Image (tube, helix red, strand yellow):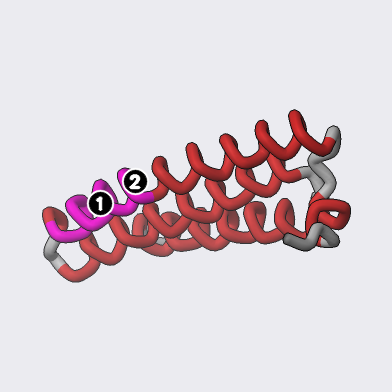
Amino acid sequence: MSTLEILMAGVIAIIGIGLYGLLITRNLIKVVVALQILVKGALLALVAAGEASGQVNLGQSLAITVIVADTVVAVVGLALAVQAKRLLGTLDVDALSTLKG
C-alpha cells in the first residue's frame, strides 16, 4: 500500500467523521466544529492531490488560502452562536430555525 493510498484513506475517515458530526448534533457550536473537521479533511485532500500531480506548491498554496477563508467563516459562525445564546438562551439548531424576521 502506497503512502498516497494511506493518506486518502485518512482523508475519507476525517470527512466521514465531520459528516457524522453534522448529522447527529443539534448544538450550533458543535456544528461549527464538525464543519471545521470537514474542511481539515478537504485541506488534506488538496495537499495530497498536489503531491500526486507533482505540483506540491500549488496544493499547499490552495490549502493556505482555504485556511484563511475557513478561519473567517469559523469566527463569524462562533460569534453568531454566542449572540444567539445571549439573546435567545439556546443553541439548538431546530429552535433557531423556527425564527422569523
Helix, strand, or loop for circle 2? helix
- Position of residue 14 in the picture relative to residue 30 (left or right): left
Residue 9 lies, in percent from the top left, at 51, 60
Q: Is residue 88 above or below residue 45?
A: above
* Residue drawn at point x = 55 percent, y = 62 percent: 12
- Classed neighbour count for the residue bearing mark 2: other residues with Cα under 10 Å, few (<14), some (14–19), many (≥20): some
Decide whether the magenta segment is chiefly helix, strand or loop: helix
| Residue type at numbered disc 2 | Ile
- Determine which residue is flagged by label 1: 65
Residue 62 lies, in percent from the top left, at 23, 57
* Residue drawn at point x = 55 percent, y = 47 percent: 37
Extent of the magenta region: 58-69
Labelled pair 2, 1 in contact (Cβ < 8 Å): yes
Residue 83: image quadrant is top right
Residue 96 circle label: none
Helix, strand, or loop for circle 1? helix
Judging depth in this view, the residue of 82 and 49 nearest the camera is 82
Residue 26 lies, in percent from the top left, at 82, 50
* Residue drawn at point x = 42 percent, y = 63 percent: 5
Residue 84: image quadrant is top right
